[in-house]
Amino acid sequence: MIQPPLINVSGLCKEFRGGIRALNDINLSVNRGEVVVILGPSGSGKSTLIRCINGLEETTSGEIKVEGKSLAGNSERKWRNHRLEVGMVFQNYALFPHLNVIKNITLAPLRAGVLKKEEAVQEARRLLELVGLAAKENSPVASLSGGQQQRIAICRALAMKPKAILFDEPTSALDPEMVGEVLSVMRRLADEGVTMICVTHEMGFAKSAADRIVFMDKGEIVEEAPPQKFFSAPESDRSRRFLDLIS
Ligand code: ADP
Ligand code: MG
């Protein structure tokens, strides 16, 4: 039997109040283990798209399916579940500043009741090891650098064993010397087969880690291509103009 894509977006439109059309007929399929990088100029709808996929933004029309199941008509409880299954990492980390590192990571699995305290702590330690922050488990998050906080935010998303992780410009708020440590964690997840949708302006990461580039402009997907093709021979004028501006 053919498995449905992990995430399937069809005919998605999003209009904000005041008639701003942020997304116009978006169609996008993401398979298990795929790394999709979304590129596009500011205001092209990248954040809105992944926020819709995560259920942080109501859609105006169209459909989003996860493993073939539509999210339409989800109850609050189902949305909460969905947000745990499809994790999200934001530009500004969005950690709980008053909690220490290990509590930030274990909070969601404990609240959801999917792990017992001991298991949750063990899993958190494994993840901290993975991102090179084992020594920080008892530190208040506010005492950490931006790069460290973002690595903790990635651990927090991973702690729920999500089906996919959505990244919204995870390195844009970081000082340049911290960008690399976060990208290397993301690259490692990509290598391990974690399904990821990443909005980023890091072209090195896009070129080396993406299975597919999705280029957006003015609320639409203008072009989809493997990175080798997109960066060397983009098909649309808009992609070419974008690449000229950033190179
Ligand atoms: P990107 O992430 O590509 O920079 P966004 O998804 O943030 O783009 O924004 C797409 C469009 O939607 C922009 O015109 C933006 O001004 C508008 N927009 C985004 N969020 C809101 C909102 N909460 N209310 C009204 N307009 C919004
Ligand atoms: Mg954005």
Image: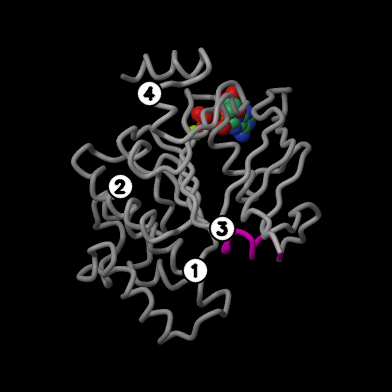
Distance from the alpha carbon under mark 2 to that under mark 1: 20 Å
> Which residue in the protein does label 4 denote?
232
How many other residues sit within 10 Å of disc 4, few (<14), some (14-19) or many (≥20)?
Answer: few
Asked where in the image residue 227 lies, by quadrant, the reply is: top left
Distance from the alpha carbon under mark 3 to that under mark 4: 32 Å
Query: Which of pointers 3 and 4 lies earlier in the amino acid sequence?
Result: 3
Amino acid type, mark 4: Ser
The front one of 120 and 233 is 233
Distance from the alpha carbon under mark 1 to that under mark 4: 36 Å
Dominant secondary structure (helix, strand or loop) of the stretch shown in magenta = helix
Distance from the alpha carbon under mark 2 to that under mark 4: 23 Å
Asked where in the image residue 51 lies, by quadrant, the reply is: top right
Q: Is residue 148 left or right of residue 15?
A: left
Residue found farthest to the right: 73
Across and down, in percent, residue 149 comes to: 31, 55
- Magenta highlight range: 78-86
Across and down, in percent, residue 26 comes to: 67, 33
Query: Which of pointers 1 and 3 lies earlier in the amino acid sequence?
Result: 3
Mark 2 lies on a secondary structure that is helix
Distance from the alpha carbon under mark 2 to that under mark 3: 20 Å
How many other residues sit within 10 Å of disc 2, few (<14), some (14-19) or many (≥20)?
Answer: some
Q: In the drawing, what numbered circle is on residue 86?
A: 3
Q: Mark 2 vs mark 4: give the one in front.
A: 4
Asked where in the image residue 217 lies, by quadrant, the reply is: top right
Query: Which of pointers 2 and 1 lies earlier in the amino acid sequence?
Result: 1
